[in-house]
Image: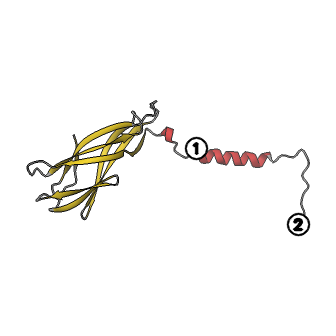
Amino acid sequence: MIRLRRVEPGFRPWGVMFIAATLLALGCAGAKREADRAYTGGLATVEDFTVHEPPIDTGRVSITVRGTLPDPCTRIDRIDRDRSAARIEVQVRTRRESGDICAQVVTPFERTFQLDLAGTPPGLYTLTIHGITRPLSVSGNRFDGSLDPL
């Protein structure tokens, strides 16, 4: 049989509350807060892009990307690409320094970069940037995967 202890009217479980508060504080102290990071990374919002193929075979194409950034303090950090089979996927990565005070105004951008096609077998590819796709015809070049911002 279990016997229950009667709690006096003035009793407060301070010890239990102290232990719970201490554990909560220690658990939060180990987590890296957004404000503690040097910068915040993300992806740009891409609305459209255009592929400019040169008149002569240079092994590169220019790609102009248009879209928006969440605020004027966010900038394009780098262009990443991945190729698998007949698909080339490009991501426009952003960076915003932590602690910057900035107006929360959507900011349009336009950026042109070079996609090196040296090493890509000839054929028809699908170029995808943030869900938007365009056909890309490669003739006689090989792709090594480098991207050079202009």
Badges 2 and 1: C-beta atoms under 8 Å apart? no
Residue drawn at (60%, 48%) of the image: 27
Q: Residue furthest left?
A: 56
Residue drawn at (14%, 62%) of the image: 122
In this figure, what is the number of numbered marks? 2
Residue drawn at (23%, 44%) of the image: 113
Residue 95 position, x and y percent, is 38, 40
Residue 68 position, x and y percent, is 36, 40
Q: Is residue 139 left or right of residue 104?
A: left
Neighbor class of circle 1 (other Cα within 10 Å; few <14, some 14-19, many 20+) is few
The answer to which image quadrant residue 135 occupies is: bottom left
**Mark 2 falls on what kind of element?**
loop
Residue 13 position, x and y percent, is 81, 48
Residue drawn at (46%, 40%) of the image: 37
Q: Which mark is residue 2?
A: 2
Residue assigned mark 1: 29
Front-most of residues 112 and 16:
112
Identify the mark nearer the N-term, 2 or 1.
2
Q: Amino acid at mark 1?
A: Ala
Residue 52 position, x and y percent, is 18, 47
Q: Quadrant where the N terminus lies?
A: bottom right
Q: CA distance from mark 2 to mark 1?
A: 40 Å
Above-or-below relation of 130 to 72? below
Q: Which mark is residue 68?
A: none
Q: Quadrant where the C terminus lies?
A: top left
**Mark 1 falls on what kind of element?**
helix
Q: Amino acid at mark 2?
A: Ile
Neighbor class of circle 2 (other Cα within 10 Å; few <14, some 14-19, many 20+) is few
